[in-house]
Amino acid sequence: MAASKSQRWVIVGIAVVAGIVALVAGGLYFGAKALKGKVEQALGPEAEIGEVRLGLTSVEVVRLRLKAPAGWPAPDTLRAERIRIAPDLLALLSAKVSISSIVVEGGYVSALRGADGKLRVVPSLLEKKEEKKEAGKGPEVAIGAIELKDGVMEFFDATVRRPAHKIRLEQLNAKVTDLKLPDLQAKSSLHLDGVIKGVRSDGKMQVDGWMVFASKDSELHHTLRGVDLVALQPYLLKAGEGGVRKGTLDLDLQSTIKANHLRAPGTLTLNVLEL
């Protein structure tokens, strides 16, 4: 049981990071086009943008929204109150684009793990990967750092319940460094922390380590403290086995993914569990 829950928390962590990468993918268009209409066209018919502001050293996008496709468990797949992109202006003159930083404020991402176990994050962007490859390779882009400030993520898991069980993460702060697009072969360091919303109380989470996004190879240390077991009930008990009245979960987990193989030793502690 502990191994199964550990794997799911690794998947949640990967979903958060993938959501940040999706924000970056949108941000690249902002730096390259710098025009509202072109941005919306590049992001597709699901995109809505309030305003694009041009500064001397940065481009700012205000009120970005990507509407969810039919059957998605949330109205939007992605939102952001403000995205600031600070490019390396000299590098823009070459084929290699360099961006020193991308800062996302008030971001929201929804992720869905379907009944088949497949994880989907911002499908209107990330699931067009093969289509974009056929259309031609874009410019090489180096990004120094991406920061997410005060973000929210909703993770829907259809493998444990129908309709999909929701885990909501709030107050998410994250930083990812050293990204190289479009191949995403670089080893990127990452940190994220936030609050896991519960029914009786809220818990805290923290993830530190590195990841190669192209292969998903990673070494990550996950820490959970005081996570409400009532909110995790579908992972603990099968339908008809009763319910969880109260209790919290603490977890220290060191996960390693290499060649699509997961190894995740750790310690799981259940506190004041009452069924």
Image (tube, helix red, strand yellow):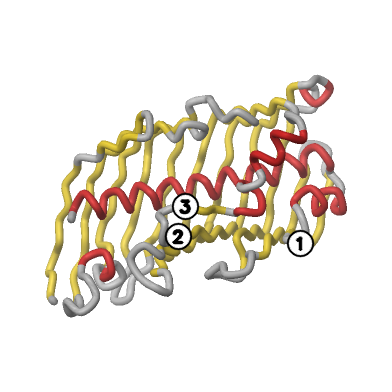
Q: Residues within 10 Å of mark 2 (few under 14, many from 20)?
A: some
Distance from disc 1 to disc 2, alpha carbons, whole Å, reads: 26 Å
Q: Nearer the viewer, residue 139 or 203?
A: 139
Left/right placement of residue 269 relative to residue 152 reads left
Residue at numbered disc 1? 48
**CB-based contact (under 8 Å), mark 1 and mark 3:** no
How many numbered discs, if any? 3
For mark 3, give the secondary structure. strand
Q: x and y percent of residue 165 in the render?
A: 39, 69
The quadrant of the rendering that contains the C terminus is bottom left
| Residue found 76% across the figure and 62% down from its top | 48
Residue at numbered disc 2? 114
Q: x and y percent of residue 1 in the render?
A: 18, 56
Q: Residues within 10 Å of mark 3 (few under 14, many from 20)?
A: some
| Residue found 79% across the figure and 62% down from its top | 50
Q: Residues within 10 Å of mark 1 (few under 14, many from 20)?
A: some
Viewer-nearest of discs 1 and 2:
2
Mark 1 vs mark 2: which is more N-terminal?
1
Residue at numbered disc 3? 119
- Up-down relation of residue 64 to residue 184 (above or below): below
Q: Nearer the viewer, residue 119 or 94?
A: 119
- Up-down relation of residue 125 to residue 153 (above or below): above
| Residue found 56% across the figure and 67% down from its top | 72
Mark 3 vs mark 2: which is more N-terminal?
2
Q: Amino acid at mark 1?
A: Glu
